[in-house]
Image (cartoon, rainbow, N blue to C red):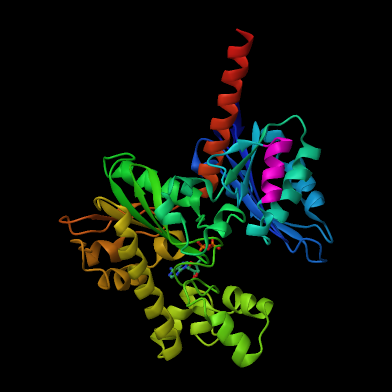
Amino acid sequence: MISIKIGNNDVSTSVLVINCGSSSIKYALVSERREDRIYGLAENLGSENARIKGITAGGQPLELAIPNANHEQALETLLERLSHYNPQAIGHRVVHGGTLTKAHLLTPDIIQRIREATPLAPLHNPAHLVGIEATMRLFPELPQVAVFDTAFHQTMPAHAYRYAVPKFLFTDHNVRRYGFHGTSHAYVSERGSELAGSLKQGGWLTAHLGNGSSTCAIWNGQSVDTSMGLTPLEGVVMGTRSGDVDPSIHSFLASNLGWDIFKIDKMLNKESGLLGLSNNLSNDMRTLIEASEQGNEDATLAIEVFCYRLAKSLAALSCGLPRIDGLFFTGGIGENSAYIREKTMAYLPHFGFNLDKEKNNTLKRGTEGRIDAGAGPQIWVIPTDEEGRIAKETEHVVEQLSREANAAIA
Ligand code: ADP
C-alpha cells in the first residue's frame, strides 16, 4: 500500500467504496484506520436540491450544492475532490449478484451478469449500473470491483434456499431465496466470532436491524440461512417493509379491494412495517420509542410486533445450526437500542440465552461489547462496517489478480 498523509497521520491508501441508489450515492474512502475515513452522501440527484454532504479528512463537515447534477456529474465532483488521496481501486456495492458467489473485478461479462439480475432487484441494480458505467468512464485506469449483498448467502443449502413452489420456477426463472445484507452479516459474524475467541468457528445468529432488517444463521463462517428471500421484502418487520405475510394477501386485496399488483407491492414495500403498524406515525424506531413512552398505543404495538417477529425469526434460523454459540446485534437499531435488544431477548428465553440487563443498558453507543450474563450462548453488540468489508473484499480481488498476473509473467 502507498502511504499518504491525512491530518497528522500517515496512513495507507485507500479504496473508494461507492453505493449508487436511484437518486443518491453513498461514498467512503476507506484506509487502514477507521478514524481516517472520509465519507458522505450525494443526494437529491437530478433535482435542483442536489448536494453532497459528508465528512472530509480531519473529520470536518462538508456540504456542497451541485444543482441538477446527475450521477455522473456528482461522481465527477466527488472523484475530483478525492483523487489526490490516490485511491487504488473502486469497490461498488451491488445488491443483487444472482448466483455469483463472491466479489468480482468488473469485466463486461460481470456487468452483463449484474444486468441479468435486474428483474430480481429492479430498484437497485439499474442504479448500480449507472454508477459503475460512470466510474469506468471517469477512471478507466483503476481496477473496479463489484461486491454483492447476495454473495455471502450463496453457501445456503438447497433446503434453505428453495421455495415450495413448482420446480420450473426455480430452474427456468431463478425463483429461489437469495438473502441480502450479506456484507454486514459477513463482517459482523467474522468480527464477533473473532472477539469471542473462535474466529469463523461455531454457530452464530446475526440480527442486522436498520431501516431494512434481516437475520442470518452462520456456521463456521458461512451463511446457512437468512430471513430475506427472493427480494428484500421477506422476513422480519422493517421500517416500511412488511416482512413475512400470507402470500394470499395479494388475491385477497385484489378480490376485495380491487387493488392491482403494483399497488399491493407498493403497500408491502413502502407503507407497511413500523410505518404501517404505527398508523403512519413513523418508520423510525427512535420516534416510535419516544411516542410509546408518551402512551401512543400504535407505536407500542409496532415495537412489540417488531421484537416478537425478530425473536421468532432467530429461533427459526437456529434450525440451520448444529449448535448456537451466540448472537450478534448490529445496524442502527441493534447497535443503539438497549430497549429493543432487551424486549427481543425477553421473547427468546430458549437455548440458554441470558441477557445481562445492566451490561446491555450501559454499553456505550457505537462500541463493541458483550451483553450476556456468562452462562449459555454469548450475546454481543457489533457495530457493522459494510464499507470496510467492501473495501477489504475489493483489495482481496485486486491482490489476487496481481498475484495471477505476476505468476503469468514468471
Ligand atoms: P439503514 O438501514 O438505512 O442503514 P440504520 O442502520 O442507520 O439504517 O438504522 C436506522 C434505524 O436505526 C432507524 O429506525 C433509527 O431510528 C434507528 N436508531 C438509531 N439510533 C437509535 C436509538 N438510539 N434507539 C433506537 N433506534 C435507533
Residue in view at x 53 percent, y 50 percent = 150
Query: From this viewpoint, is residue 62 visible?
Result: no
Q: Is 278 inside the magenta-drawn segment?
A: no
Quarter the C terminus occupies: top right
Q: Nearer the viewer, residue 357 or 310?
A: 310
Q: Nearer the viewer, residue 355 or 252?
A: 252
Read off the magenta span: 106-116
Q: Position of residue 88 (x, y in %)?
A: 65, 31
Is 319 displayed left or right of 356 in the figure? right
Is 126 displayed left or right of 378 in the figure? right
Quarter the N terminus occupies: top right
Q: Position of residue 369 (x, y in %)?
A: 31, 53
Which picture quadrant has residue 14? top right
Residue in view at x 53 percent, y 76 percent = 283
Is 170 displayed left or right of 316 in the figure? right
Is 208 displayed left or right of 379 in the figure? right
Q: Position of residue 37 (x, y in %)?
A: 56, 44
Looking at the rendered structure, the number of numbered marks drawn on it comes to 0
Which residue of the protein is positioned furthest toward the left in this rendering? 375
Residue in view at x 72 percent, y 43 percent = 112
Q: Position of residue 172 (x, y in %)?
A: 61, 54
Query: From this viewpoint, is residue 318 visible?
Result: yes
Magenta span main SS? helix
Q: Is 115 inside the magenta-drawn segment?
A: yes
Vertically, is 155 above or below 252? above
